[in-house]
Amino acid sequence: MACLVILAVCANPSDAQTNAKAQILFQRARNKNQSVGSRQAALNDINQALVLEPQNATYWLEKAAIYTRMEEQEQALPCINKSLQYDKKNAAAWEAKGTILMGLSRYKEALEVMNEAVRLDSAPNIRMTHADVLMRINRVNEAETELDEMVRQEPNNPLVRQRRSRVAAVNNHWQKVVDDLTVVIASRNDTGLQLTTALTLRAKAYNKLKQYDRSIADLKRGLKLSPDDRPLHEELLNTYKLSGDKKSAQREKYNLDKLDSDFVP
């Protein structure tokens, strides 16, 4: 009995060292996975971690994440299956598998997987992925209903609002698009492409609602940030035509033609 105790005590430091080394490799892999240029190195690190702890569900999940970011879904799938083999109650792993299956255009399987993910955890990112799958299989009304519930729960979440705006546009629910993109635009602290894209999309929704003055205001705001943005100019021209402002439409057509000629080699 004493010998067994001694053996157990002697084994613990070695196990602890193995776990610590594996954890360092895992964290290093996670950091390297953030950059395109270091993903192969991330894969090498996570493989070393898995040699030390081959039944660690978190490490298999990270390996799947690396392959997914490398757009290697076929290789990511067996990794996520391994992760779920060792931890079937991890909603994040189920959500990752759903994303991988969508990347492989296996939407029916993805929906089954996402149903399980939502059953385990109804976090916003999981429910958004679930809604994405519903969209892919043309169950648009169900996707919008799910996102409606998410908006009720988190009305100021710009990610949820942005996702619903896309679905609402498909269903021609333009006031929802305006409401959602208003939250998205208010959340943007930058002046880059994402902001101008949101302004363009909200302007299109305003046009559908025949609120042309608001559309013009959005498009002019966008053009102040990005004067050479062709989609902004195109939508502004369209808005002037819809509103019956022929003079402004003619002027904007000139601006658009000049923009095109400036880019001719």
Image (tube, rainbow, N blue to C red):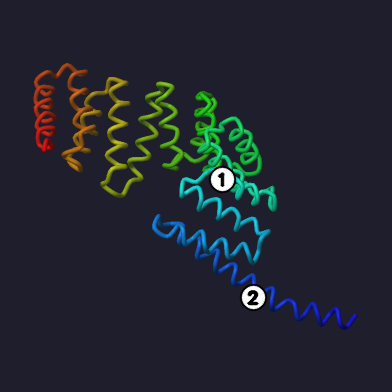
Residue identified by numbered label 2: 17
Q: Is residue 12 left or right of residue 42?
A: right
Q: Nearer the viewer, residue 171 or 78?
A: 78
Where is residue 254? Give x, y as percent: 9, 27
Whether residue 254 is visible here, answered yes or no, is: yes
The percent coordinates of residue 96 (x first, y second) are 56, 45
For badge 2, the amino acid type reads Gln
Which amino acid, mark 1?
Ala
Disc 1 designates what residue? 96
Q: 10 Å neighbourhood of mark 1: few (<14), some, or many (≥20)?
A: many
First reached walking from the N terminus: tag 2 or tag 1? 2
Q: Where does the N terminus fall, quadrant-wise?
A: bottom right
Residue at image x 62%, y 41%? 117
As drawn, the label of residue 203 is none
Q: Residue at x 31, y 21 (%)?
A: 208
Is 182 situated left or right of 99 in this image? left
In the image shown, does 119 or 99 lie closer to the viewer? 99
**Residue drawn 50% across the image and 47% down it:** 68
Q: Between 236 and 89, which is closer to the camera in this rendering?
A: 89
Crowd band around label 2 with a 10 angstrom C-alpha radius: few (<14), some (14–19), many (20+)? few
